[in-house]
Amino acid sequence: MKILILPGDGIGPEIIAQATRVLDVLRSDGLKVETETAPLGGAAYDQYGAPYPQVTQDLARAADAVLLGAVGGPQYDTLDRPLRPERGLLAIRKDLNLFANLRPAILYPELANASTLKPEVVSGLDILIVRELTGDIYFGQPRGVHVNEAGEREGFNTMRYSESEIRRIAHVAFKAAQKRQKKLCSVDKANVLETTEFWKEIVTDVAKEYPDVALSHMYVDNAAMQLVRNPKQFDVMVTGNIFGDILSDEASMLTGSIGMLPSASLDQNNKGMYEPSHGSAPDIAGKNLANPLATILSLAMLLRYSGNNEAAAVRVENAVKAVLAQGYRTGDIFEAGTNKVSCSEMGDAVVAAL
Ligand SMILES: NC(=O)C1=CN([C@@H]2O[C@H](COP(=O)(O)OP(=O)(O)OC[C@H]3O[C@@H](n4cnc5c(N)ncnc54)[C@H](O)[C@@H]3O)[C@@H](O)[C@H]2O)C=CC1
Ligand SMILES: CC(C)CC(=O)C(=O)O
Ligand SMILES: [Mg+2]
């Protein structure tokens, strides 16, 4: 298997370094992988003047899977939009047709007290958020800032979803629910937005092919509230790009920290890009403070989905469980009585536990 590694910006290189060490151990134990490394985002802009340069595109297309740290940073926030790191991320997702973003929010029992919610609200939590990733207001045209008819400057983006885009993500979500508790909640804002009323209509139609899955619908504002009130009511949630982006950050805090939430972004054939759900955390970048576990768990997802290697995935996940049981904690999940470690020390612990 060919894996392209994209460290990206901010904490990206630090967390990717720990995931790469884990991969190296698996490789020394016989896992057949070739790796290449390329820049994406701000790092690519600095080197090539573009956030998703040709060299990265060529390697990404040739790879079976991509492992990404994160992109972005304040030094890039004043660049023209097409040059910004986040555009590079959107471009690679679109280029590789990675429409299905799986974001599992699982609470490891050892982290029940790291959550800001009461342990009884989150203990045993196991939710899968299925987020559509290549459509919606993040990609819809027209977009921009112009002077309107009243002579005033005005910003605009467009929320759009085609029927085929909704159908294919709905199928992914129903199939995922079939393998879990057979409950799917589709999240929309159908009371206000035509695009998401259409979403609801199509998801309801696709449901006819999955009679064993109980489908429910919820408005996104209520879903945001219910995730905090009673998150264990959910099994699989399916939603569009922007709602999924926001709800998955919210769900991450149910697991103790955004530094714990991995993700897989898949195409129709399980080629995928794997990345933590968080960003480049400029506030802690370069300080060896970041939690690398979301990235290491993203590597596990890579091994499972693109590598078709369940045993290797479980080995990595068990190592993460072991280090949590041993009491290792980066600052974001630290609590009294545990052992506070740096990003690289957490990597040491995971490598030792493999
Ligand atoms: N997939 C990606 O590459 C994403 C990139 N971004 C970009 O990242 C930059 C920062 O965005 P923010 O809104 O601050 O979101 P962020 O997720 O980078 O950080 C939010 C907060 O969570 C903390 N945090 C995040 N990951 C952590 C980790 N592994 N360990 C410990 N603490 C962690 C940060 O220190 C910060 O306090 C921006 O340029 C943004 O556009 C944001 C989200 C996703
Ligand atoms: C640049 C953003 C679209 C990335 C993000 O926030 C995410 O994918 O979670
Ligand atoms: Mg996000």
Image (cartoon, grey):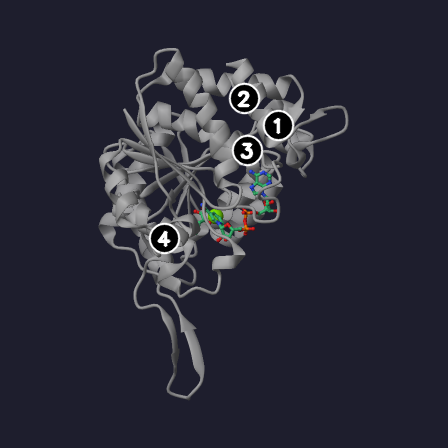
Q: Is residue 8 visible?
A: yes
N-terminal-most mark, 2 or 3: 3
Check disc 2: other Cα within 10 Å, few if <14, some if 14-19, many if 20+: many
- Marks 1/4: CA–CA distance: 40 Å
User: Considering the numbered disc 2 on the image, is that residue within a helix, a strand or a loop?
Assistant: helix
Side of 22 relative to 143 (left or right) = right
For the residues labelled 3 and 4, the Cα–Cα distance comes to: 26 Å
Report if the beta carbon of the residue with label 3 is closer than 8 angstroms to ligand 1.
Answer: no
Q: Residue furthest top?
A: 29
Looking at the rendered structure, the kind of residue marked 4 is: Pro
Residue 184 falls in image quadrant: top left
* Residue at mark 3: 260
Nearest the camera: 101 or 312?
312
Q: Which residue is mark 2?
A: 320
Q: Earlier in the sequence, mark 3 or mark 4?
A: 4
**Going by the picture, which residue comes out furthest to the right?**
336
Dot 3: what SS?
helix
Q: Residue, x 42% and y 28% (percent of image)?
A: 299
Q: Amino acid at mark 1?
A: Ser
Give whichever of 316, 169 is nearer the camera: 316
Q: Characterize the local packing of mark 3: few (<14), some (14-19) or many (20 or more) Cα atoms within 10 angstroms.
A: many
Query: Pointer 4: what residue?
Result: 51
